[in-house]
Amino acid sequence: MLEIAAKPIHIFLNFNAVIVNLDSLPLEIQQSCVNSIEKNIKTLKTYLEENILEKENIPEIPKTGMAVLQQQYVLVEAIEKWIASLKEHFPSNNE
């Protein structure tokens, strides 16, 4: 554990490969990709919310385990906000 703790932190989000290449796609496909990612983030957020509620009052669950669930929830919230800001760059369907 000391070896892993001493290594640089790498955060790899698999959907970033899609985001980096969005400009090479037609606008409609770009929007579809971002909407799919947004939907999956919302699904993950719901899962984490349920998991946290289910486990938060169980004394046998280690505090460190709950801390990791909270960390994941905070990251999902940040990604959710980031996706909303990304979507602001797309022309609205009313234009």
Image: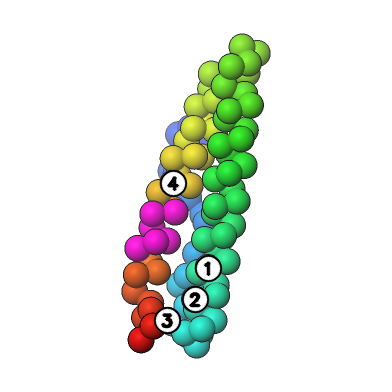
- The verdict on residue 82 being magenta is yes
The residue stretch that appears in magenta? 80-85
Rounded to the nearest angstrom, the CA distance separating label 4 from label 1 is: 16 Å
- Residue at point 53%, 18% (across, down): 63
Residue 14: image quadrant is: bottom right
Cα distance, mark 1 to mark 3? 14 Å
> Which residue is under mark 3?
93
Secondary structure at badge 2 equals helix
Residue type at numbered disc 3: Asn
Residue 31: assigned label: 2
Q: Mark 2 belongs to which amino acid?
A: Gln
Q: What is the spatial separation of the Cα atoms under label 1 and label 2, in whole angstroms?
A: 6 Å
What residue type is disc 1 on? Asn
Q: What element carries label 4?
A: helix
Type of amino acid at the residue the image marks with label 4: Glu
Q: Which of the two labelled residues, at mark 1 and mark 3, occupies the earlier sequence position? A: 1
Give the numbered dot on residue 43: none
Q: Is residue 49 magenta?
A: no
Is 82 located above or below residue 35 in the figure? above
User: Which element carries disc 3, helix, strand or loop?
Assistant: loop
Residue 61 shown left or right of residue 92 in the figure: right
